[in-house]
Amino acid sequence: MTFDHVSGTLSDLDRLVIHHVPPGGNWKHLPVDFPSARVRQIRASATRGEGSRSTYYGRLSWEKAAYTISTYITRPGNGCFIHPEADRLITVREAARLQSFPDHVRFHGTTRQRAMQIGNAVPPLLAYHLGTAIAPGTAVDLFAGAGGLGLGLELAGHQVLLSVDNDARALETLRSHAATHHRAEQFDLSDPIEFRNMLDAARMALGGRELGLLAGGPPCQGFSTAGPCRVDDPRNRLVLSFLKAVEELGPENVLFENVPALRWRGKQFLDELVERLAGLGYTSEIRIIHAEAYGVPQLRRRLIVMASKSGSPRWPEPTHQLIRPYFEADQPGPLVESDVRVTVRDAIGDLPLFARDDPDQSVPLASAASDYARWLRGELSIDQLLRSTDLVAHGGQ
Ligand SMILES: C[S@@+](CC[C@H](N)C(=O)[O-])C[C@H]1O[C@@H](n2cnc3c(N)ncnc32)[C@H](O)[C@@H]1O
C-alpha cells in the first residue's frame, strides 16, 4: 500500500480540456474555438513561432517516459500532467514515482506544497548514480528541499550529516526518510546570521572530520524556462551563498545542481561559480545530464557541476541509451525523444485509477509491478534493480 494518492482540483474548463486530450496528446487536440483564454494564448504564441509548448495540457502515454515533472503538477496547463487513462491529473504519489522517490517517503504540507517538493527534487535514482562517481564520505546538502538529492547520495554510500532548507514543510518530508545521524535544519541561507549558524551546525555535525562532499541545488525559479525569467530575482544570488559555503567548509568534492537554462539565463552566476572554484583549487566540469539515461521514467535535463580538489571529477556511466547522443541536448530546443525502457506504466501502473481526497488514506497496490516499481515499493534493493537493468541492456532475461 502507499499514500499521497491525491491530485490537484480541476475547474469545469479543465475537465473539458482533459476530456478532449488523448494519451500522448496536448492542447493541439483542442478545437480551435475552445473557450479558454489560456489555450488561445498558447496557440497564438505557437503560431508566432515562440516555441510549440508541446507539453502544455499534455496527457501522459502509458508506454513512454513522462516529460519533466515540474512543481506545476496540480494544474493541467503548464506541462504534461494528465493521467494516461483516468480523467484527472497525476497524484502526488504518481509524481513521486515518476521522480523515483521510494514509497516510504511521506510528503508533508498541502497538496500544492507536496507538489513543489517533488517537482523541485533531483530524482533520487539520478542522485544515486551521481553519488557513485564520488568517493563516499561525509556530506552536507544545502537547499535540500524534500531531500531527493540527499536520498540518492545516501543510497550511494555517502553519510549525509546535515541537510538545510528554509522550508519547514519540506524539512518535515526530509525527516520522514533521513537516517538517524542525519540532521535536517531550517536556515535562511540569504541571511548572513543564519548562514553563519548553518556553518556552525555543519562543523558540529562533522565533529572534527573532513567534509567529503558539499552538495546543493539552489532555487532555480529565476533561471528556469518553466516560469517567468527574472535574472534579478534575489533567489538567484543563492548560487553565490552556495559558493561561500564551499569557501568556508572546504569540502573535498562539490556537487551543484540546477536547470540547464543557468547556462544562458544565469551565465554570470555560473561563470563566477566555476572561476571561484578554480581559485579555491578545484577542478570542475559542467555537464547537462538526462535523468532518463539513468533509468528515471522522465525526460528531465539538469545542469550538474562536479568539482574536486584531487583532479578531474568523475561522472557516472549512463545505464540507459538515448536515441540522440547523451551530451548533445545542452541547448534550448525541442524535447528529446529517448529510447526509453522505463515507462509511465512501469512507474505508476500498479496504482489505483481513482485518486483519493485525503493524502493520509492508504491505497492498495496491484501486484503486477515492474522492477522499477518493485524497487520503489521496497521489494528490490538498488543492486537488484541495477542488475535487472543490466540484463535488459545486454539482451538477457
Ligand atoms: C531546487 S530546490 C532543491 C531540491 C533538492 N535538492 C532535492 O533534491 O529535493 C531548492 C530549495 O531551496 C530552498 N530555498 C529557497 N530559498 C532558500 C533560502 N533563502 N535558504 C535556504 N533554502 C532556500 C527551497 O525551499 C527549495 O527547497
Image: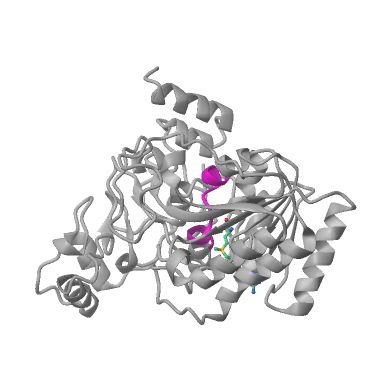
Vertical relation: 357 (above or below) 152: below
Residue at image position (46%, 64%) is 263
Q: Nearer the viewer, residue 20 or 64?
A: 64
Quarter-of-image position of residue 340: top left
Q: Nearer the viewer, residue 116 or 386?
A: 386
Q: Is residue 126 visible?
A: yes
Residue 89 horizontal/vertical position (percent): 34, 59
Q: Nearer the viewer, residue 278 or 300?
A: 278
Residue 61 horizontal/vertical position (percent): 27, 47
Left of 363 or right of it: where is 168?
A: right
Q: Is residue 166 visible?
A: no
Quarter-of-image position of residue 137: top right
Residue at image position (31%, 38%) is 339
Residue at image position (41%, 43%) is 292
The segment highlighted magenta reads 117-127
Q: Is residue 348 magenta?
A: no
